[in-house]
């Protein structure tokens, strides 16, 4: 039993000592999470901007139809239907009935024209909003995957630190990291010296030639 | 069902006449939306690439969480385990 426990411990110690040298501050998870929240806000603003833009396009259509197209339409329709003679009919009831029908025909054409121009705008808006939802959804989901991963790193970091501390090896990781940094600095310095030597050597070679 | 409007046909002809008269402005209105929608589209990488990368990262996350759980279990074993670990370390 004790042998099994020792084996487990050796295995665990291997895991424990297989330390990531990079430090993982808890704030990295918070930063990633905050970015995820802000992305939702950016998406909401982007959607609002799209609505505003397409509302402007719909207003352009309304302005065009109300101020230009309807005028052109009415000028033709008044002549084509001989409106002047319609209103001069002797029977006032017939005049009223014809005018109601005449007005209904105008309203129907103006509405149809607006609808014909606004439908593609509505469709484009819906497609664009769907595109925005899909794109932001993809980015937000990927960011949450990154947040979860960073969170898993901080969990390991935290459990490793606690376990090492309990074993009286609380400074082990710092010592390993410091030693690695020192080795890295020395290696960099060595490389610089080697480069400098190589440069000197090239100069000497140049002089010999 | 409403009775047919006796001015319908004439109204349609008048609408066509107005369309012809304002043809260039109508085309401009239609072209405006098509051009702008292209500029407004978000160009992100495709779903396939995201799915592939997400799967790899999620797998690594799961492994990290398992490792954290293993280390947590060692710690929860308590003093005896810690003493054993110290012994193992001193032997090493």
Image (cartoon, rainbow, N blue to C red):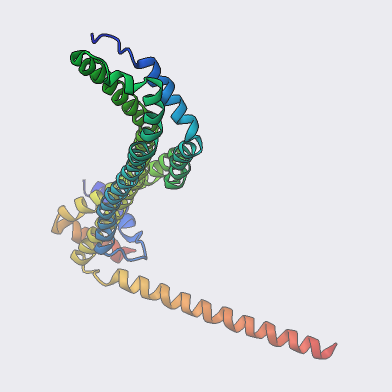
Q: Is residue B67 visible?
A: no
Residue depicted at 27% across the width and 65% down the height: A25
> Residue A134 at what x, y percent from top left?
36, 39
Q: Image quadrant for the N terminus of chain B?
A: top left
Q: Residue A38's quadrant in the figure?
A: bottom left
> Residue B30 at what x, y percent from top left?
45, 37
Q: Residue farthest to the bottom?
A: A207
User: Which is more toward the observer, A106 or A146?
Assistant: A106
Classify A171 as above or below A103.
below
Numbered disc total: 0
Classify A18 as above or below A76.
below
> Residue B74 at what x, y percent from top left?
21, 53
Residue depicted at 23% across the width and 49% down the height: B69
Residue depicted at 18% across the width and 56% down the height: B75
Q: Image quadrant for the C terminus of chain B?
A: bottom left
User: Which is more toward the observer, B46 or A176?
Assistant: B46
> Residue A13 at what x, y percent from top left?
30, 57
User: Which is more toward the observer, A42 or B90?
Assistant: A42
Left or right position of B52 against B64: right
Q: Is residue A85 visible?
A: yes
Q: Residue farthest to the right?
A: A209
Q: Residue A156's quadrant in the figure?
A: bottom left
User: Which is more toward the observer, B79 or B1?
Assistant: B1
């Amino acid at each position: 039993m004790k042998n099994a426990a020792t084996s487990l411990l050796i295995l665990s110690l291997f895991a424990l000592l297989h330390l990531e040298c990079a430090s993982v501050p808890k704030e990295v998870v918070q930063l990633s999470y905050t970015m995820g929240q802000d992305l939702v806000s950016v998406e909401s603003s982007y959607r609002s901007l799209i609505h505003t833009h397409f509302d402007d396009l719909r207003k352009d259509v309304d302005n065009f139809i109300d101020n230009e197209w309807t005028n052109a339409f009415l000028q033709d329709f008044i002549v084509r239907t001989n409106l002047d003679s319609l209103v001069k009919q002797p029977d006032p009831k017939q005049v009223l009935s014809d005018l109601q029908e005449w007005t209904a025909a105008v309203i129907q054409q103006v509405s149809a024209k607006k609808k014909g121009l606004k439908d593609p705008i509505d469709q484009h808006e819906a497609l664009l909003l769907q595109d925005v939802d899909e794109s932001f959804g993809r980015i937000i989901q990927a960011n949450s995957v990154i947040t979860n991963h960073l969170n898993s790193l901080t969990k390991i970091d935290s459990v490793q630190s606690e376990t090492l501390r309990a074993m009286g090896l609380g400074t082990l990781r710092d010592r390993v990291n410091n030693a690695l940094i020192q080795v890295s600095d020395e290696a960099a310095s060595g490389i610089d010296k080697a480069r400098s030597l190589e440069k000197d050597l090239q100069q000497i070679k140049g002089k010999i030639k | 069902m409403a009775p047919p409007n006796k001015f319908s046909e004439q109204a349609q002809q008048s609408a066509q006449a107005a369309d012809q008269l304002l043809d260039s402005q109508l085309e401009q209105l239609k072209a405006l939306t098509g051009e702008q929608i292209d500029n407004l589209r978000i160009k992100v990488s495709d779903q396939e690439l995201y799915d592939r990368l997400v799967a790899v990262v999620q797998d690594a996350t799961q492994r990290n969480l398992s490792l954290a759980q293993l280390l947590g279990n060692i710690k929860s074993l308590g003093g005896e385990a810690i003493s054993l670990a110290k012994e193992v370390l001193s032997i090493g």
